[in-house]
Image (spheres, coloured by chain):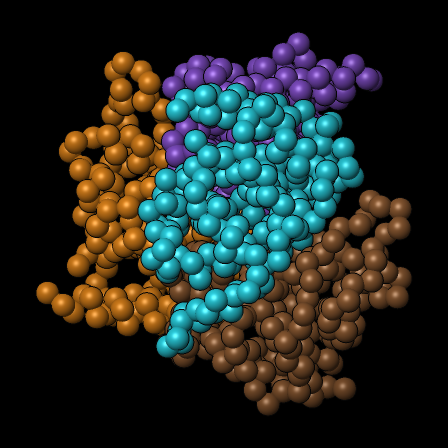
Chain colours: A purple, B orange, C brown, D cyan
């Protein structure tokens, strides 16, 4: 059982990372900060004769690793009522590789399970993040990924998430699940 | 009356541009393709003592021009049930400049009027784009921008939008408005 | 090809009916005002041993007719950011009959095609009605009904819809489709 | 500090009531089941010369009591991806009384605080109930009611909600708040 957390935040040690760490405490997983990767915006070549061309950045390396996972935790602060631009670039490039036979995109995606962590503060993220949760739902329905659960955490300044007992409670319950499934072979 | 269209598409001559051109036919406006600008992801420094640092890219130049506009047309293809990553990066960086006294962000934003053009194809964008329209609504409500209207156009391959008579109809009616308001002075 | 329009409005000759009539001009169809039927709220008996009991109202008569249709136009004013209570009662009672072998609910629903007309005024219904459109989408996805298209019309006082050229344009194009399909045998 | 819970469910002792009772354990509050009231659908007379006419049912009695509350808990099962028809009828009739000087609707509403409890099961209510939460948000924004928090509980058969630790956790934390505010004079 391979687990990866993809963090779309623009800084380390933030509230999203805090929830990721709590959910995965004691569990073996890969933690990938998008800020450590150079990911270029997609150049849409679906309708050109030559098709997509190779892009000289860090994306494919990360994507190849991502495709091998069974469980993904997508974690992002709520920026302007959506996922961070960094994380959006990560999704946009799927369009390039979903057509690449090398990755068997459709089949492998349909076997994945996704968890989403969003944190924000003002206005109330439990309302402000709803379009983003719906966007994730559309993405997962379209690709066949199972949308297991999500947390909308409240916190802005570093550490504030520690006061959000609901988010902590849910992260802890995920931790039990993740501990269970990684015990099994 | 200053009008600017911001195109988040990754290619020229696409369906979003077609609708932009139709809506603004015969009207003086600035047309800005985000693909012509190097825009870096935001590095969140709100909670550091030094604050945001100057970023060496094309963003501030575009942003300064953007702030002078009265009417903005945000145009983006629907990528993974959201705006393009390119356009998201444009919004994310607002967080840096909204705190900058030089720009009087709050006051100037509250005087702007926004129009949104989204195009997509499969699944049906009139459903698939709804979370994105709601995200725009939150952004505009938060900043005080007036959300005048939106078009969800159907089309994937170049030129397909020409078959979407509803979108064309609305673009034409916007054109009348834009022609009117730019005549006044 | 059987077509039925179900009107959830609490008055006749309103804006929703105007759009229904335009969309179905010259086409044979059944027009059903929910205000002509006594429809009781559902009493949930799914978890009782005796199951649902017969309800003494007009619902089943309407429902039986509804099940025979191929195309349904659901038309409702936007009341408090949702469908009218009258129309909601119509949907709620599905829970009773979807378990009734007599109606072959699942199979028959999955062959239907639905169109939705919503009208409202202030605030802007093109934003205010989006949760309702998403609710319809969930209902249709769950039951297998094809969600063909929707109109969000702007108008409050009687006749105001006549100024909403976009809605009229769409209703006219539906009319062409309905005229076509009813010509075929 | 007056607290009222309005239950839109069609049966007693269900999962929504369980959460209501837990959130208000030990707190003085009024509990109102809509199934105990005869509430007629609204007849829209906004655009007639005579205006709304008196309706012979139980609504106004309940409404008058409702207007005296400071905190409202709206509790409903998720029926067809929305609030129950019973609860929708309750909201629809606001349109009649919001224009009635006797009730000072606008002023009194803007002083209320609302909590929402929704329970459902399949499909996953944490996704399926999002349009409903957005509908509540629009209603509260429009009327000036403060939308304090919501719970989306998972459970279908009676008692199943007892397995949803997240909902129980949140209900318990509300209970602390309600206990506090009712202690104050």
B48 versus B21 height, above or below: above
C18 versus D94 height, above or below: below
Residue C185 in view in this figure: yes
* Residue C55 at x, y percent in the picture: 78, 63
Q: How many marks?
A: 0
Q: Residue at x 54, y 82 (%)?
A: C21
- Quadrant in the picture for the N terminus of chain B: bottom left
Is B111 left, or right, of D51 in this rendering?
left
Q: Residue at x 62, y 49 (%)?
A: D34
- Quadrant in the picture for the C terminus of chain B: bottom left
Q: Which of A85 and C104 is in front in this view?
A: C104
Is B158 left, or right, of B48 in this rendering?
right
Residue B15 in view in this figure: no
Q: Residue at x 41, y 28 (%)?
A: A121
D21 versus D9 height, above or below: above
* Residue A31 at x, y percent in the picture: 58, 18
* Residue D36 at x, y percent in the picture: 65, 50
Q: Which residue is drawn at 29% across and 65% down?
A: B24
A104 versus D27 height, above or below: below
Is B121 left, or right, of B134 in this rendering?
right
* Residue C155 at x, y percent in the picture: 40, 70
As drawn, the residue found furthest toward the left would be B185
Q: Nearer the viewer, residue B3 or D104?
A: D104
Q: Nearer the viewer, residue C106 or D165?
A: D165
């Amino acid at each position: 059982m391979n687990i990866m957390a993809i963090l779309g935040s623009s800084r380390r040690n933030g509230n999203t990372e805090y929830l990721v760490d709590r959910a995965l405490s004691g569990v073996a997983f890969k933690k990938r900060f998008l800020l450590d990767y150079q990911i270029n915006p997609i150049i849409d070549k679906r309708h050109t004769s030559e098709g997509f061309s190779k892009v000289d950045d860090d994306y494919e390396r990360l994507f190849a690793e991502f495709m091998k996972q069974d469980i993904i935790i997508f974690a992002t602060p709520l920026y302007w009522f959506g996922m961070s631009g960094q994380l959006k670039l990560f999704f946009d490039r799927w369009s390039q590789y979903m057509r690449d036979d090398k990755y068997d995109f459709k089949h492998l995606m349909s076997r994945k399970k996704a968890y989403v962590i969003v944190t924000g503060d003002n206005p109330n993220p439990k309302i402000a993040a709803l379009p983003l949760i719906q966007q994730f739902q559309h993405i997962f329905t379209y690709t066949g990924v199972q949308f297991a659960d999500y947390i909308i955490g409240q916190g802005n300044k570093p550490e504030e998430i520690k006061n959000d007992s609901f988010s902590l409670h849910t992260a802890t319950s995920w931790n039990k699940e993740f501990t269970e499934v990684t015990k099994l072979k």
